[in-house]
Amino acid sequence: MFDFVIIWTVAWILRVTYWILLIVSGIWLYRVLKLRALPWLGVHFALSIILGFITDGIVRQLITEGTPPFGWTSTDFAMRLSSYHFLTHCIVNILVILLALSEIIFLMSKSDPTQVPTPMRPFLLIQRRMTVVGTVLILLTLAYPSLIMAFWIA
């Protein structure tokens, strides 16, 4: 049991350190470069931090102490939650990469438009549609925790 507590504590310290480094570097980059994707990414990561702390405990409680919905067993419930989380997490990660790449391509086009390779030009469309892509990112960030909250309340 003691080993578990140490590993869990170290994992949380590393998790918090990761988020702090990400937030501080994001704020600095936004001040220096005024990148449009950074506020969206900042909101995404802030929500991920807060909701990650909340949903971890709720999922653990739902699986160990709660009654799974729809007559599922605890194993079925855990597998469905895990699959849904994996799917939303993959889509969110792709959106984060697309936002980051669009900013890099935008900076390249700003300095010298001839330096942007033709296959990379579609990323400039993401830059022009930043509000839509950012909103989808935030909604998908909220999707998994919303499902967890719905199961917890029900």
Image (cartoon, rainbow, N blue to C red):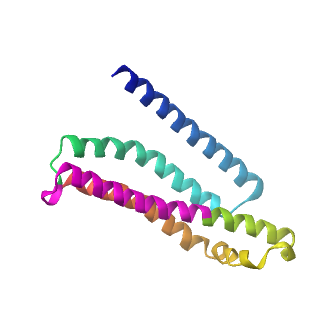
Asked if the stretch drawn in magenta spans residue 93, the answer is yes
Residue at x-position 71% and y-position 47%: 28
Quarter of the image for residue 17 reads top right
The quarter of the picture where the N terminus appears is: top left
The image shows residue 91 at horizontal and vertical percentages of: 48, 65
Q: Residue at x 51, y 38 (%)?
A: 15
Q: Looking at the picture, tell me which residue is in the foreground, 6 or 148.
A: 6
Residue 92 image position (x, y, % from top left): 50, 62
Query: In the image, is residue 9 above or below residue 127?
Result: above
In this rendering, would 121 be left or right of 69? Answer: right
Q: Nearer the viewer, residue 32 or 95?
A: 95
Check residue 92 for magenta coloring.
Answer: yes
Magenta region's main secondary structure? helix
Residue 144: percent from left, percent from top: 37, 58
Q: Residue at x 58, y 40 (%)?
A: 18
Residue 152 picture location, percent across and down: 23, 51
Span highlighted in magenta in the image: 69-97
